[in-house]
Image: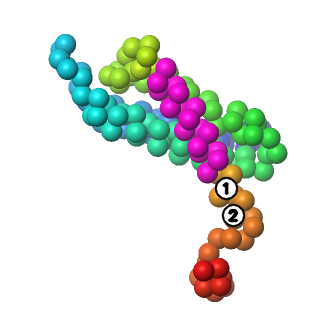
Amino acid sequence: MRAVLSAWLTSGVLAVMALLALKALAPVDGDGGPVDEYAQVLRVHLPWLVFCVLMAVAAGSYVRDWATGFGRALAALPAPVLGGLATAFIGVPSSGTAVGLILHLIEAVLGVILGLALSKALSQRWDAGGANTREHGEWRRNR
């Protein structure tokens, strides 16, 4: 239980940082003018996806010893999903509509899947001793 609480706390701190970054980066809505989709993708959706991956990697590092992927997903999923819901409340322009909110939630789930896969791959490589370190000269033998 301690690992889950640590995972939630760490990913929650990253979620707060992500929401602050989204609020600062989000383009201003025009008054009925054309919407710049590229600005929304590069300034809102891409940073949110990257932060969701980081949240899942941070949470996955605490619960990497768990045998089931379902338990890891339960430890990593709350902060990105709650953050995705919070984007509508803090006024991020692309999440004010139902479609934008659903898109943020889809990005949160996709980020968690990618982050947990990355966390699991990194932990397996670390456990197998495949990390290249210069201290023991292994980096030359592995190349």
Q: Looking at the image, which is closer to me, 2 or 66?
A: 66
Q: Residue at x 35, y 34 (%)?
A: 41
Q: How is the image coloured?
A: rainbow
Q: Residue at x 78, y 50 (%)?
A: 65
Is residue 91 in the magenta section? no
**Residue 125's mark?**
2
Q: Looking at the image, which is closer to me, 67 or 106?
A: 106
Quadrant where the C terminus is found in the figure: bottom right
Q: Which residue is mark 1?
A: 121
Q: Does residue 95 show up?
A: yes
> How many neighbours does mark 2 have within 10 angstroms: few (below 14), some (14-19), or many (20 or more)?
few
Q: Does residue 88 show up?
A: no
Is residue 106 in the magenta section? yes
Position in image of residue 80 (x %, y %): 55, 32
Magenta range is 102-118
Q: Residue at x 35, y 23 (%)?
A: 94
